Each structure stands twice: as structure tokens, then as C-alpha cells.
Amino acid sequence: MSISFTSSIISRLKREIADIQMQSASDKIKREKALAKIKQLQKNIKMSSSPTDLSSKMTQITKLTEEAARIEASQAAIAKQLTAKNAELRQQLAKNAPQD
């Protein structure tokens, strides 16, 4: 393989890795916000007396818990993807290294 072809593969892999890392960071922020909102709703439940209000807050908590779980599963998939891309990058860098 030519060096320029390998270099373009390396550049593409670096971009993909950066994109995956940005997505991971964004998902972590979303998950933290969902968990913070759950905590806040749980505090507010203690102060609520209306059955309708309680039901509404419980529904919100359920949806946020599901969202946090979905994000967590997505994080696991992203971690696998990132590991694979990093391994592929290392392999391409080894190919691109000057041969002695």
C-alpha cells in the first residue's frame, strides 16, 4: 500500500475516533442531567400532596430512568467502537512506520 493511502486511512480513523469521543462526552452529560433531574423529582415528591402531581412525577422519573439506561447501553457500544477504532489506528500506524 502506498504511504499516502495509509496516511488518508490514518486521518480518517483519527477523525472517527474524535467524533466517537465527542459523542461519548455528549452522552455522559445527557445522562448526568437525567440523573440530576431524577434526584430533583424525588425530592419534590416528598413535598407533593396531590395524587395527580405524584403520578406525573413518577412518570417523569420512569422516563428519565429509561433514558439513563439507554444512554448507558449506548456508552457501552461506544466504548467497544472506540476500542476497535484505536486498534485499527495502531495497526495502520504500524504499517505506515518506516521499515528498517
Image (spheres, rainbow, N blue to C red):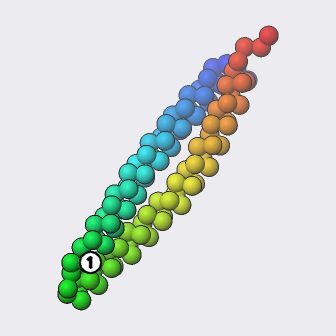
The residue sitting at the top extreme is: 100
Choose top left, top right, bottom left or bottom right for residue 98.
top right
Q: Taking 65 as reference, is 58 left or right?
A: left
- Indicate the position of residue 90 as horizontal and vertical percent values: 67, 30
Viewer-proximal residue among 23 and 3: 23
Q: Taking 68 as reference, is 98 left or right?
A: right
Choose top left, top right, bottom left or bottom right for residue 4.
top right
In the picture of the structure, the residue carrying the numbered disc 1 is 45
**Number of on-image labels:** 1
Viewer-proximal residue among 9 and 31: 31
The residue sitting at the bottom extreme is: 51
Q: Quadrant of the C terminus?
A: top right
What type is the residue that disc 1 sits on?
Ile
Q: Quadrant of the N terminus?
A: top right
Choose top left, top right, bottom left or bottom right for residue 40.
bottom left
- Indicate the position of residue 7 as horizontal and vertical percent values: 61, 23
From what the image shows, is residue 13 above or below residue 71?
above
Q: Taking 55 as reference, is 15 left or right?
A: right
Residue at 38% in and 56% down: 32
From what the image shows, is residue 88 above or below residue 30?
above
Viewer-proximal residue among 24 and 11: 24
Q: Residues within 10 Å of mark 1 (few under 14, many from 20)?
A: some
- Indicate the position of residue 77 as horizontal and vertical percent values: 58, 54
Residue at 23% in and 87% down: 52
Disc 1, SS: helix
Residue at 35% in and 73% down: 61
- Indicate the position of residue 50 as horizontal and vertical percent values: 20, 87
